[in-house]
Amino acid sequence: MRLSTFCVVILLLGVLSAQAAVMAAGNTVPRAGTVFLGEQGLDITATGATAGSQIVWYGPGGSPASVPTATLTVDDPAEFYISPVLFGDKTGPWFVIPGNSLAFYVQDPLIEIRVVDETRNFQITNEVTWIPKGDVVGFRIDTNVYEIAKRPGSPGAPVTLRVRGPGGVEYSSLDGYQLEDIMVSGSPFQTGPVWFTGDYESGSYSVWAESTGNDMNLNYKREGKTVTPPVEFLLQSTNPLITPEPTTRPATVLTTLPPTTIPATLPPATVQTQVPATTLTESPGTPPATGTPATTPTSAVPGFGTALSVSALAAGTLILVIRRR
């Protein structure tokens, strides 16, 4: 095996060992420590519980002097599960009997996420849903699971941030800041400015957080308990509340003139009949015409004379026929 390969193997083993140590430390519950609904694989041997021993609950704020309200038998104290079904309505102190020594406190986990514009010092709310592209963003986590940090050797309570961008893309890191297993040791926990938005695509984003310690987010997936409601906002350069003015010229309005009315029937055209001039011929011996103007003869209707002659002939023929009879 080459030396470089050997070094890589050793490095990986070291990382895995460190992760296992962190997980083990996060699983170890001290006497009178705090555990959360949904946590599994807990080691509660330090509380005095043993395999087959019993733990009891005396009710909210109950006193060990009273009669237990609930009793559970411990199967394996090194692999203990805070079942939401068994412990869901029984938060508070649990005791190991017969000595009634305090074993641990059961709590309902709570978590909330806030998206903060560190550049302009505001956070996303129901009324403010826009971050100017180019601003630097940070996150604030409010939770009670930081109590896990009080366990022996624990670096904190692991919380994972989920960031989903345009097209459904989910990010595991933002500008080198890892979003998985962020160790929270107090509340509120603030990341500070970790996301320079100028390098990311404009569009709609969703951010939510999950408490992943000992798989509580898988065993007890409740909004507001182990997972936050998504915080949604728009990342773009222009304020979406400002409507830009139109840049195109208004359309030219053409005025339509009413159509010209044309009469359906035109008046008949006046036909002027030119009357030919009458030529007067002087006969020999006829005294010259006096100054009295000659009467203009009336123009005969064409064909009228012919029609008259035909009518007269027909009338004469009819008279002769009648007389012969």
Image (tube, helix red, strand yellow):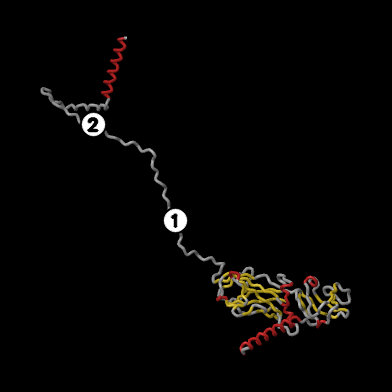
Q: Which mark is residue 55?
A: none
Q: Position of residue 171 (x, y in %)?
A: 61, 75
Q: Position of residue 313 (x, y in %)?
A: 27, 18
Residue found 63% across the figure and 86% down from its top: 8
Question: Split into 4 quadrants, where in the image is the N terminus?
Answer: bottom right
Q: Which residue is mark 1?
A: 253
Decide if residue 241 is on the left or right side of residue 265. Answer: right
Q: Residue furthest bottom?
A: 3
Decide if residue 246 is on the left or right side of residue 147. Answer: left
Q: Position of residue 20 (x, y in %)?
A: 71, 83
Q: Amino acid at mark 2?
A: Val
Residue found 69% across the figure and 83% down from its top: 19
The residue carrying pointer 2 sits among few (fewer than 14), some (14 to 19) or many (20 or more) residues within 10 Å by Cα, namely few
Q: Which mark is residue 275?
A: 2
Question: Split into 4 quadrants, where in the image is the C terminus?
Answer: top left
Nearer to us in this view, 207 or 27:
27
- Whether pointer 1 and pointer 2 mark residues with C-beta atoms closer than 8 Å, the reply is no
Q: Residue furthest front?
A: 1
Quarter residue 95 falls in: bottom right
Q: Secondary structure at mark 2?
A: loop
Residue found 81% across the figure and 82% down from its top: 45
Q: Secondary structure at mark 1?
A: loop
Nearer to us in this view, 264 or 155:
155
Quarter residue 13 falls in: bottom right
From mark 1 to mark 2, how far is it between C-alphas? 60 Å
Decide if residue 291 is on the left or right side of residue 272. Answer: left
Quarter residue 104 falls in: bottom right
Q: Amino acid at mark 1?
A: Val
Decide which of tag 1 and tag 2 comes sooner along the chain: 1
Q: Position of residue 133 (x, y in %)?
A: 56, 73
Nearer to us in this view, 33 or 9:
9
